[in-house]
Image (cartoon, rainbow, N blue to C red):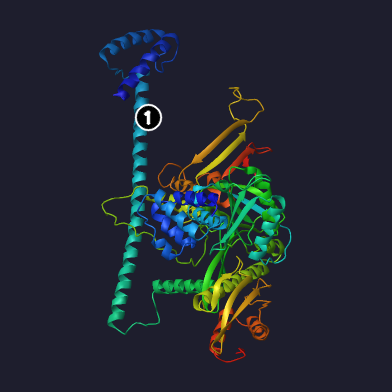
Amino acid sequence: QEEEEGPLRKKSSCFPHIATSQGMEPGQGELTPAFSLAGEWQGKMEEGKAYSPHGVFAHLEMLEARAHEADLKEEEATQQEEKLARLKARVQELTLQRDELQAKVDLQQKRQLEKEGVASDPAQPSAQAVLEWKIKRVKAMLQVFSLTGISGKLTKQGVCFCISTAYEGTYLDSYYLDLLTKPEVRILRHSIPIFIPLEQLAKKYLQTDIRRFLSVLSNHLNAYAARKYQADQLQEHFSDQIEGTLQTNSLCNLLVFNYNVPNKSKTFPFNVRLLYGDLCSSIPTKAPASLAEMAAAHSDLFCHVALHKAFRSFRNAGESVAGAP
Amino acid sequence: MDEIVAEYIRRTVLKIPRDEIKTVLQKWGFLSEAQLQTINFCQIKENISQDVVQLCEENSAGIKQAAVLDIIYNHIYSNKRVWSVYQMNKTGEETDFFDLTDFKKKFKRRLHSALTNVTINFREYEDNAIWIRIAWGTPYTKPNQYKASYVVYHSQTPYVFISVSVLRSNLPLLCQALVAASNYHDIHEMELRSHSLNSLKDIVFKRYSQNFQSYYPRPIQERNVAPEIDSRIIQENRNEKERIQRVNSEVFGDGPQPKLEFARYKLETMFKSDPEMNVLNKKEPFRCLVKFSSPHLLESLKSLSPMGMADAPLSPLLTCIPHKARNYFKIKEKKGVSPRSFVSP
């Protein structure tokens, strides 16, 4: 509908032009036919159609029709092209799919053949099994690594170390240290007990030699854990020989207690004061005890053997006189 | 037996809930089992306390035993008092052989040299905690047993937990004595206060749960088994919920939080408004005090994000409380190009 109205509108706008211009009409060189045409045009306008086979309007009409046809043709052509492209793509897609399925079918056939035929090579595990085995191995490796005492994991901002303590085959507590690496190595947070001299060690070694820092810290922690473990073991297994309570402190580096040693159906009370001078050691450095003879031997024993082992040897010595094991 | 001592013991017993009186007296150990059997613990507290005083009279209790009973009471009901944390500094690096007898001697000597009318009592507990009870007097009056101060100290640590009585004027003397006895140089008060003594210990001794990353995490306690999920219910926001859970876990850890009752933020920042509005545009900082209080502050902060009341991650001003070991903050303007606030140390 628009197409039809278009030329009408165009012609109506042409009307004033034709009225004022001269010599626009191609075929006729006079003014009068313009006027006559105008009159004709008016009449035709009332009719609603314009058909004059001669003259401007006719020509315009013709041109317009041609243009319109050309447009339509072009549109059709582009549509055809698009359709063609789509179909080509589809063809490609389908060929790909067909190839995939074909490959699958081939593989299936091959497997089928293999099963029926000679038994397949057992040393050819599937990719999945290999991956699982690799994961298991890595996990086991990490577990072993953590059992060594010092293990770490990279974090977004640095590293997180885990120091595990152990004493003679028994695993005790683990402590964590979260370090930042940029701009310089710093401790972000930790779970190290407050009485371990962490700041001192950090000041000394953290910036310069991280390995040494971790090693020294690990020694401190392990020694503390060992001393605590020994004290606990003593209280647990030898409470009958201990008089009263064990006086100790947070670091367990000073132990004062009274103990009895049976000797020829008499018990001798001793008081000992164990001083652990070296915080990295689980053996005391000084152990002055009362009652000279036995004391010297006991003192010596304390400075060489673990606490609960020393007591075990007293018990084993039993009725013998000089309690040296 | 002294009238004062008798009255003091009676009042202490009255403070204990009736069902617990027997256990506390057993812990005290001053009255024998036989004597305890003679007391009827089902009568009203008034009568129980009278009976106890009677028995103490028979054993001739002195102020020392009464003080020990008081320490035991405060140890069990430590959350009835407000505890502050003090930090000590020292410069030496020698290994410290902390000897308890030595400590007690030095402490007493220091206090007695300044003030003769004081009652000092000690009690040690299994976790290496040393409880000290000090009743203060003046040069002219006897010690007031009802307004005693309590100090809890763990050997070889730089932290002291003090619950002061109303008489704060004796605090400097107390601090001096502590520093001298424990071989430190100076002491200052930290911005950390709470009713729960154990939580304060957890915070400064770093015993609270922190989430450390490791390849081989030690097995944690079994969590609650996930409830049976109906397959017809679809969680639309599952990803978001999981993200919030993860962030929360990273910040707060998985275990129980230390128990604090409040966090106080003192703001001394400039009011930032549109310059055209001309509101409070003077150079004076806008003073404001924000106080968060809760029966269990950190647990409630931890549950804010999962409940949808706040975005995860929470503001670092809230989450840094256990890490910075403080619950009193002063927020000032950051002096520099960007006008952002920072927390004063």
Residue B183, visible in the rendered structure: yes
Rendered image quadrant of residue A187: bottom right
Name the foreground residue: B212 vs A237.
A237
Q: Residue B48 location in percent, x, y?
A: 41, 53
Q: Residue B274 location in percent, x, y?
A: 58, 26
Rendered image quadrant of residue B109: bottom right
Name the foreground residue: B165 vs A179.
B165
Residue at left offset 29%, top offset 80%: A115
Residue extending farthest to the right is: B92
**SS at badge 1:** helix
Q: Residue B331 location in percent, x, y?
A: 61, 39
Task: Look at label 1 and name its amino acid.
Answer: Ala
Image quadrant occupied by the C terminus of chain B: top right
> In the drawing, does residue A6 fall left or right of residue B303?
left
**Which residue was labeled with disc 1?**
A67
> In the drawing, does residue B3 fall left or right of residue B92?
left
Tell me the chain of label 1.
A
Residue at left offset 31%, top offset 24%: A2
Q: Residue B141 location in percent, x, y?
A: 64, 45
Rendered image quadrant of residue A111: bottom left
Crowdedness near tag 1: few (<14), some (14–19) or many (≥20) residues, C-alpha within 10 Å = few
